[in-house]
Image (spheres, rainbow, N blue to C red):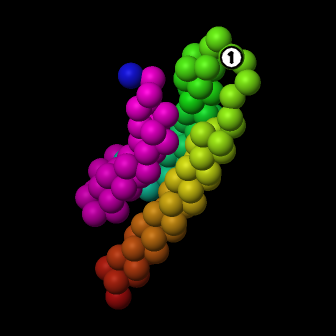
Amino acid sequence: MLNILPLLLIIFPVLSQLLLGSYSIYKSSSLKFSPISWINFLLQIIFSFLAFNIADYNLAKQYEPNPVRCGMPLVAMAAACFFFIFILIIIIVIQFLIKRWRAKRNTV
């Protein structure tokens, strides 16, 4: 379970923003767009740290008899975290522009 958990932790806020953000734009509900975006952004940062620590723990357990190990998988995990933060920001900006366009179109 710990092998796939870092990837799931990194992807969860992006999927949550796609689903809940779209829901808050297109449906009138108690879910507002701004709190959903901030919560998902903070979760992305927190889950990135958790995923990095879990990946580090997995590598430590894999190479337990020999303490010397390659750090490239951790670099890949850090790059994936930054990539998904960038993707999340792009999704938030696009959803915000759609929300603003829909509000402007409804007032005209």
The quarter holding residue 103 reads bottom left
| Depth check, front residue: 90 or 33 | 90
Number of marks present in the image shown:
1
Q: Work out which residue is located at the far bottom of the displayed protein and give it.
A: 108
Residue found 38% across the figure and 46% down from its top? 16
Q: Is residue 9 left or right of residue 44?
A: left
Q: Is residue 15 above or below residue 93?
A: above
Q: Is residue 50 above or below residue 81?
A: above
Residue 27 x %, y %: 26, 58
Magenta part of the chain: 2-30
| Depth check, front residue: 89 or 107 | 89
Residue 49 x %, y %: 63, 34
Residue 85 x %, y %: 57, 53
Residue found 62% across the figure and 51% down from its top? 79
On the rendered image, what quadrant is the N terminus found in? Answer: top left
The quarter holding residue 24 reads bottom left
Residue found 49% across the figure and 42% down from its top? 10
Where is mark 1, residue-wise?
Answer: 66
Residue found 32% across the figure and 52% down from its top? 19
The quarter holding residue 95 reads bottom left
Q: Is residue 39 visible?
A: no
